[in-house]
Image (cartoon, rainbow, N blue to C red):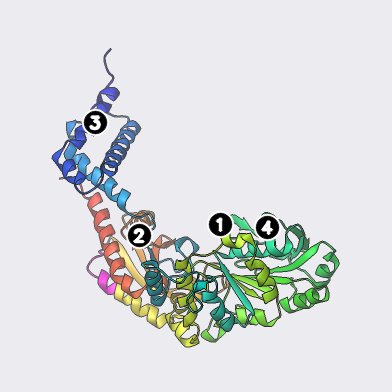
């Protein structure tokens, strides 16, 4: 039976063993394991086969198309992809300071050093050095958390959703929790307060309406099955205009009258009054503790500027119950998180130092003069790289806080706007995103925007080099073949 042109072309794809016998591949086998090399060859050949199957005209594929010399760079790339970590550093040029998708809060150098010191050797994670016996991992941060916040007791778990889950399961399993309908928000990643509550074993009792809830609504909803009153910070959701909510102070008084614990999910806990630095008001952890609330929960990697963690502060009588819940072990944080969190918290002993040195707080409070200087440094590095094919404009714009914190806050910033003329802005964005390191930007009105607020000073050379490489690549792709 004669083969079709399609089949003849596919038969030209070399075999794995044939490729493995090449001297170049033998040399690679001296550096990388056979499993890595074989997988790279298979992926490269699969990519070639899929590319062929998408084509309609097979007459153009000569023997050169299947030559080892042409395929070898593909195999090399596949090898590199296998040994490269998937979790990578990126340059955040979006202007979103607490970017959930990009790892939220960058850590302070002291936190990184402590993390490295603890990770490369043994530590007193659960060992009491003074008494020479088993200790608790939570004591390493409990004292400083209580000192900074004024709380009686503290507990840290792996994230804030876990903190809320633990509180509800411990204090309200099998009973009702009263929440305002206007506070039934969806947390990042499509996790919703009602869903977390359901998993905790507690039942939801909604009160009020979406825009208005009164103290009397809570009062009328309290029954024998009521376990606690829950207030939830609405994060990046706001009801404006004809709206009202019950203050935490009033809710605490109501809880005392009925001997019910009151819990406040702050979401993004802040230890510094940000209004004195020109930012909008965000309730501080200390203010919430002073209301007499029984427990509050918040994230460690948002406005706090530390690693991912769920921090629980409050009355000792309630937190002692949390600490004995078997779920606490399932939700506990590891030694690396503890090391990074402790170092971050120590910076708060000096508020001015915290604002100047914790990356998240420093980015939030940077003025446009400093951002303009950073932008000019980038502009200077790009001089001579660009041509009439693209325009560079350093101008004013606004950044966002992100992470559900200060949702209405617009931060004046400086951005570098790149306007390509003979290729699409989407092509520019995609190539920068796929670079090394990836540069994550935003697009606005056919311009690519690089926000200087979230670009670190040491990243400016990398940013300029990445842009140069991409522009050179795009220009080369447009040159007619010789």
State if disc 2 and disc 1 touch (CB < 8 Å).
Answer: no
Residue receiving disc 4:
200
Location of residue 234 by image quarter: bottom right
> Which disc is residue 189 wearing?
1
Q: Is residue 358 left or right of residue 382?
A: right
Residue receiving disc 2:
438
Foreground mark, 1 or 2? 1
Q: Which residues are magenta?
A: 379-387
State if disc 1 and disc 3 touch (CB < 8 Å).
Answer: no
Foreground mark, 4 or 1? 4
Q: Whole-Å distance between the Cαs marked 1 and 2?
A: 23 Å
Nearest the eye: 174 or 408:
174
382 in magenta: yes
Give the residue drawn at x 66%, y 65%: 167
Residue receiving disc 3:
15
Q: Whole-Å distance between the Cαs marked 3 and 1?
A: 44 Å
Location of residue 390 by image quarter: bottom left
Q: Whole-Å distance between the Cαs marked 4 and 1?
A: 18 Å
Q: Secondary structure at mark 3?
A: loop
């Amino acid at each position: 039976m004669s083969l079709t042109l399609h089949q003849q072309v596919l038969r030209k794809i070399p075999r794995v063993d044939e490729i493995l016998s090449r001297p170049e591949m033998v040399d690679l086998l001296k550096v990388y394991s056979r499993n890595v090399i074989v997988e790279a060859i298979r992926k490269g050949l699969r990519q070639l086969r899929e590319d062929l199957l998408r084509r309609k005209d097979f007459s153009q594929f000569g023997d050169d198309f299947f030559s080892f010399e042409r395929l070898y760079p593909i195999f090399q790339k596949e090898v590199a992809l296998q040994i490269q970590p998937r979790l990578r550093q990126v340059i955040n040029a979006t202007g979103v300071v607490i970017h959930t998708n990009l790892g939220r809060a960058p850590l302070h150098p002291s936190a990184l050093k402590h993390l490295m010191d603890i990770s490369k050797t043994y530590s007193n994670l659960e060992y009491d050095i003074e008494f020479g016996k088993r200790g608790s991992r939570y004591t390493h941060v409990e004292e400083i958390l209580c000192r900074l916040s004024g709380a009686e007791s503290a507990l840290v778990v792996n994230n804030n959703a876990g903190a809320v889950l633990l509180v509800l399961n411990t204090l309200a399993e099998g009973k009702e929790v009263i929440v305002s309908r206007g506070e039934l928000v969806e947390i990042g990643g499509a996790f919703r307060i009602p869903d977390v509550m359901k998993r905790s074993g507690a039942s939801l009792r909604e009160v009020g309406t979406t825009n208005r809830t009164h103290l009397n609504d809570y009062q009328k909803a309290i029954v024998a099955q009521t376990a606690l009153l829950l207030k939830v910070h609405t994060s990046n959701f706001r009801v404006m205009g004809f709206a009202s909510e019950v203050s935490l102070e009033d809710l605490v008084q109501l809880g005392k009258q009925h001997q019910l614990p009151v819990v406040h999910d702050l979401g993004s806990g802040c230890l510094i009054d940000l209004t004195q630095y020109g930012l909008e008001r965000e309730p501080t952890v200390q203010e919430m503790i002073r209301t007499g609330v029984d427990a509050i929960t918040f994230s460690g990697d948002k406005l706090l500027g530390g690693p991912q963690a769920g921090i629980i502060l409050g009355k000792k009588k309630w937190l002692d119950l949390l600490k004995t819940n078997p779920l606490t072990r399932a939700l506990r944080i590891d030694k690396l998180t503890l090391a990074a969190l402790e170092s971050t918290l120590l910076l708060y002993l000096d508020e001015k130092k915290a604002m100047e040195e914790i990356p998240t707080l420093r980015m939030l409070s940077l003025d446009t003069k400093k951002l303009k200087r950073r932008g000019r440094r980038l502009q200077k590095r790009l001089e001579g790289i660009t041509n009439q094919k693209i325009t560079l404009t350093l101008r004013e714009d606004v950044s966002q806080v992100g992470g559900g914190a200060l949702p209405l806050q617009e931060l004046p910033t400086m951005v570098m706007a790149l306007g390509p003329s003979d290729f699409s802005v989407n092509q520019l964005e995609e190539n920068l995103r796929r670079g090394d390191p990836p540069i994550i930007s935003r697009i606005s009105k056919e311009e690519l925007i690089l926000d200087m607020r979230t670009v670190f000073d040491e990243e400016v050379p990398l940013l300029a080099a990445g842009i140069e490489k991409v522009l050179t690549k795009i220009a080369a792709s447009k040159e007619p073949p010789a």
